[in-house]
Amino acid sequence: MIQLIYTLIALIAILVGLIAIIKIVYIAEIIIGFFSLTFGITAMIWAFKARNSLSIGSELRKYANFFLVSLMSIITFSTFDLLLSIFKDTELALYFYYPKYVFLTVTYFIFLASSYQILSIGKVFGFNKAAENIKKVMKNKKSKV
Amino acid sequence: MKNYTEILKKNLKGLSDYVALATVSPKSYKEVNIEIVKFLVKDSNMPGVYVTLNAPYGTVKKRLEDKKIDTRMILFIDAVTKTSQGIERKDNCLLIGNPQNLSDISVAMDQAVRSLPGAKRFLFFDSLSTLLLYNNAASVAQFVHFLSGRMHVWKVSGIIISLQNKKDQELIDSLLPFCDAQINMEE
C-alpha cells in the first residue's frame, strides 16, 4: 500500500514536471530533446547499477561496460544536439555543431565493439551444437533398444 | 559398501522435477559424486549439466568414464580450471576460469540447461562447500537462492552436493526451505 502511494506520488511529480517543461519551453524540438535526455540518464543509472552488481571480470560485466559507454556517448551527442537547438540562432551554435557529429560517430564505433562482444559471448555460451550431439546420442540409444 | 542408488531412489521417490540437497562426508565425497551422476545418466537416462568447482573437467570426465558413464550425455561447466583468456570452450565443456565469477557461471548454466533436448534433464552442482571457499557467505547465499529458484523454472532434476560440516551448516539450513528433498548420503 505504501509502495503504491510512493509510485502515485512519483507519477504525479513526473506529470507536473512534463507540464512545466511544455509550458516553459514552447518549441517541440527542445521539449523532445529534454525528454530524450531524461530517458537516457535514467537508462545510464540503471546500467551503472546493473554493471556494479555483476562479478568482476565476467563476460556480462564487460558487455555492460560497453553498453554503459555507448549510452554515455549517445547522451553526450543528445546534449550537444539539444544545445544546438537552444542556441541555433546565436554564435554559440558553432561550438556544438561538430562535437555533435563526433560523438555520433564515436557512438557507432562503440556499438560496433559491443556487437562484437555479444558475438563472442554467443560463441562461448552457445551450447546448441553440443546439445545437437547429445540429441544424436539419445536417438542412437533409442534405436538400439 | 553403501548402496547410494537406493538412498537416492528412496529420497527422490515420486519427484520428477526437483531441487535436492545431498550432504556427504569428505571420505565418501568422490564416490558419491560418481554414483549420483550414474543414477542421473544411466538409471534415469537423462542428459544434463555438471557444474564443477572442485575437480577439473578432465579429471571428472575420466572418473565418470572409468565407471562406464556416458559423458556424451553431459555438458560440463568447469569453474576451477584456470584459463589464459577468460572463458574458453573445450569440446562439451565451458571453462569459466574463475570460481568467483558467479555471473558467468549463472549465464552458462542457464544457456546449457535450456539447450538440452528432451523434457527430462538434470543439473548437478558440485559443490556448495567449494563455493564458500572462493566467495563470501552473502554472495553464496544469494547465488544459492538464485540457483534453487532457477532450477524450478528450468524444470530440471537438480542436485546440489555439500559436505557435512559445521561451517556449511548455516548455508545448508538457509537453502533447505527452497529444496524439495534433503538427502543424507551417509544414512
Image (cartoon, rainbow, N blue to C red):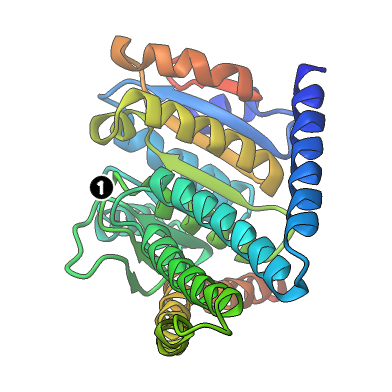
Q: Residue A95 appears at what percent x and percent y?
A: 40, 83
Q: In which quarter of the image is the C terminus of chain A?
A: bottom right
**Up-down: is A91 above or below A144?**
below
Residue B33 location in percent, x, y?
39, 39
Q: x, y (%) of residue B85?
A: 22, 70
What residue is drawn where x is 26% and y is 65%? B86
Identify which residue is drawn at 40% across, 57% down. B77
Residue B39 quadrant: top right
Report the residue that reaches farthest toward the front: A90
Q: In this view, does B43 lie to the left or right of A70?
A: right
Quadrant in which the N terminus of chain A is drawn:
top right
Depth check: A119 or A73 in front? A73
Q: Does the rendering let one see residue A110?
A: yes
Q: In this view, does A104 lie above or below A32?
A: below
Percent x, y for residue B111? 55, 62
Write down the quadrant of residue B58 in the picture.
bottom left
- Which quadrant of the structure image shows residue B138? top left
**Residue B116 in sight:** no
SS type, badge 1? loop
Q: Mark 1 points at which residue?
A: B55
Query: Within 10 angstroms of label 1, few (less than 14), some, or many (20 or more) residues?
Result: some
**The residue marked by circle 1 belongs to what chain?**
B
Look at 20% across and 64% down and name the residue there: B83
* Residue type at the position of mark 1: Ala
- Which sits in the foreground, B125 or B34? B125
